[in-house]
């Protein structure tokens, strides 16, 4: 990530810092779903995905099993 | 007694409509659980039109507010050092969320909206539950995407509250 003078970790404004934290969580959720779709398309197992995410296989499957693999044409 | 019961049933129907719309709007933004800002957008869809009239008084509409919410998200990410290219990449080709099958699940700010609506009667608010009541509950939230979106659009909290109170006075 680019470091800017407005880095949320350096801001004195808690409201801005919290807004950035919330936005980063949402972005992380989106990136996670995209990465899972790509991994499934490459034939990764749920056990491997779970290990890469640092969660249990059950937790990964429960939260992300709706993600379909990316079909590339 | 019958009038109160009828109103309770009608309010339950309105709550159901609000919850379903908020969930649909949140899911379209790749968020599983609707927050207060999604209830604001859902209130604008209610047929009573009171929330839409408040927005009209403020010189904005649902589309403007929705785009302001997206911009709030992007501004918050840029403030954390995320580049515009990374933000755009994260928003592209996101796998859709599944259709909800479990119990209704709102984000904490969405739950606060529902609790606030349930508390309206205790505060002496009469008449049917309408969209402006959602705006009134959300306007009490000092922080969060809705407050930031209104601020981004140049509508400060007193201005928003004045428009809400004006509509509520007409509805009473």
Image (cartoon, coloured by chain):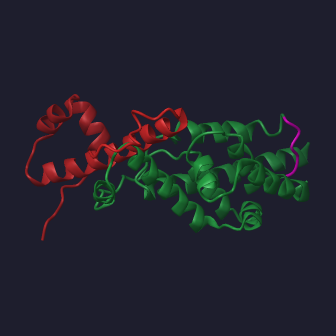
Chain colours: A red, B green
Residue B51: quadrant of the picture: bottom right
The region drawn magenta spans B123-127
Of residue B138 and residue B123, the one placed in the foreground of this image is B138
Residue A63 in the image: state x and y as whole percent.
31, 39
Total numbered circles: 0
Is residue B24 among the parts visible in the rendering? no
Q: Position of residue B53 (x, y in %)?
A: 76, 65
Q: Is residue B10 left or right of residue B97?
A: right
The percent position of residue A71, horizontal first and vertical second, equals 16, 63
Q: Nearer the viewer, residue B105 or B151?
A: B151
Q: Residue at x 51, y 57 (%)?
A: B25
Magenta span has B126?
yes
Task: Looking at this view, name the residue that lies furthest to the bottom.
Answer: A73
A59 versus B32 height, above or below: above
Give the residue at x 84% y 58%.
Answer: B167
- Residue A51: quarter of image: top left
């Amino acid at each position: 990530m680019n470091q800017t003078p407005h880095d949320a970790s350096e801001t004195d404004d808690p409201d801005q810092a919290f807004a950035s934290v919330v936005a980063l969580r949402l972005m992380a959720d989106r990136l996670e779903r995209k990465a899972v779709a790509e991994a499934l398309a490459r034939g990764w197992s749920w056990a491997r995905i779970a290990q890469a995410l640092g969660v249990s296989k059950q937790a990964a499957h429960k939260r992300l099993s709706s993600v379909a693999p990316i079909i590339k044409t | 007694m019958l009038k109160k019961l009828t109103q309770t049933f009608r309010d339950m129907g309105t709550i159901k409509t609000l919850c379903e719309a908020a969930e649909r709007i949140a899911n379209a933004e790749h968020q599983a659980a609707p927050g207060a800002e999604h209830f604001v957008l859902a209130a604008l869809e209610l047929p009573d039109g009171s929330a839409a009239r408040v927005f009209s008084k403020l010189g904005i509409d649902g589309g403007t507010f929705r785009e302001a919410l997206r911009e709030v998200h992007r501004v918050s990410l840029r403030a954390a050092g995320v580049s515009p290219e990374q933000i755009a990449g994260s928003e592209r080709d996101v796998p859709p969320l599944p259709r909800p099958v479990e119990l209704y699940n709102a984000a904490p700010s969405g739950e606060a909206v529902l609790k606030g609506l349930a508390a309206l009667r205790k505060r002496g608010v009469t008449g049917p539950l309408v969209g402006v009541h959602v705006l009134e509950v959300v306007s009490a939230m000092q922080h969060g995407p809705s407050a930031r979106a209104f601020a981004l659009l140049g509508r400060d909290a007193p201005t928003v509250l004045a428009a809400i109170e004006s509509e509520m006075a007409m509805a009473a």
